[in-house]
Image (spheres, helix red, strand yellow):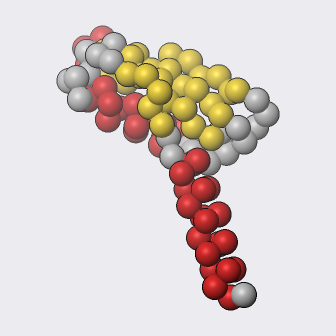
Amino acid sequence: MRTFAIVAALAVATAVGACSKPTITGANRDHVVIKTDTWMNSAETIAAKAGEECARHGRVAVLVESSADGPIGQRQFTRFDCVDAAEAE
C-alpha cells in the first residue's frame, strides 16, 4: 500500500510539473508565442522564456499581448515581438 502511495504521489508531481512549464508554441526571427498555465507562472518567467528565444536571433522580446483561454488556472497565450535592441527603446 505504501508503494502505491509513493508511486501515485510521484505521478501527480510529474503531471503538475509538466503542465506548469512555459511552452513555446510558435517562434521565428520576428515573434514568439508562449503557452502557460496562468496560475503556475509569473510574468517574469514568461518574459524570460521569450527573451531566451529572441536572443537566439540576436534580438530582444517586447510584449505584444496576452490572452487567457478558459477560466483562471487554465491556458494563457502570450505573444512577444522579437525586435532589434535599438527598436525596443
Tell which of 62 and 33 is nearer to you.
33
Q: Give coordinates of residue 50: x percent, y percent.
A: 40, 31
Q: Nearer the viewer, residue 16 or 82?
A: 16
Quarter placement of the C terminus: top left
In the picture shown, does residue 16 fall above or below 56? Answer: below
Residue closest to the far bottom: 2
User: Is 25 placed above or below 38 here?
Assistant: above
In the rendered view, tell whether residue 4 sits above or below residue 14. Answer: below
Say which of 4 and 32 sits in front: 4
Report which quarter residue 29 is drawn in: top left
- Residue 39 occupies which quadrant of the picture? top right
Residue displayed at 63% across by 31% down = 76
Residue at the image position 70 percent from the left and 38 percent from the top = 74
Image coords of residue 42 (percent x, y): 56, 43
Residue placed most toward the observer, 86 or 56: 56
Instruction: Please give the name of the residue rendered at 48% of the width and 37% of the height, measured from the top-left corner.
Output: 23
Q: Is residue 88 visible?
A: no
